[in-house]
Image: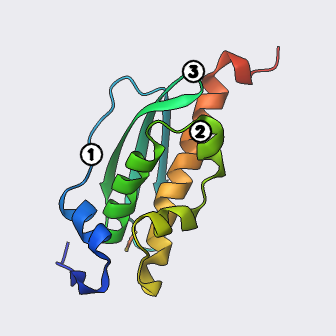
Amino acid sequence: MPSEDLRAYSDIVIEHFQHPRNAGVLADANAVGEDRNPVCGDHMKLMLRIEDDAIAEARFQTRGCPAAIATSSMATVVLTGMSVDQAAQLKRQDFVDAVGGLPKAKIHCSVLAAAALKKALASHSQSSPVGRSA
Ligand code: FES
């Protein structure tokens, strides 16, 4: 990947890009969502361990630009400890705000975190006995 000029990014983006939190595989995840940006090909996998309707642990694997890595990392921080209901309310803009904003041309990069979260929560409700109709 060509190196990218980081000067357009907030300090929070740069910090999370250079020191991502919760990167890697969550072996005992019970909710997993993946998304790929069709334009640039960047990809995110979000893994959650949900216990008692709250997110006990979150990890991510992202191949992408600094904005994608930073919003992925911040998403795991924001999500940890959050109730599933609260997490389901989060929108793309919440992740943009959490990293101190993104340059206009990079707003689309935050879609990965929001879309992967939506898919992860859907995967959990499908596998949860509570979510099934009898
Ligand atoms: S350029 Fe692909 S997610 Fe940022």
N-term-proximal mark, 1 vs 3: 1
Identified by mark 1, the residue type is: Ala
Number of residues whose C-alpha sits closer than 10 Å to that of mark 3, classed few (under 14), some (14–19) or many (20 or more): few
Q: In terms of secondary structure, where does tag 1 sit? A: loop
Q: Mark 3 points at which residue?
A: 52
Q: Name the residue under label 2.
A: 121
Q: In terms of secondary structure, where does tag 2 sit? A: helix
Q: Is mark 3 within 8 Å of ligand 1?
A: no
User: In this rendering, is residue 34 above or below 3?
Assistant: above
Identified by mark 2, the residue type is: Leu
Q: In which quarter of the image is the C terminus?
A: top right
From the top left corner, tell me how far across and down residue 38 is, in percent: 49, 68
Foreground pick, 61 / 18: 18
User: In this rendering, is residue 126 above or below 107?
Assistant: above
Foreground pick, 96 / 61: 96
* Residue in the picture at 23% in, 80% down: 6
Q: Do the residues labelled 1 and 2 touch (CB within 8 Å)?
A: no
Q: Name the residue under label 1.
A: 23
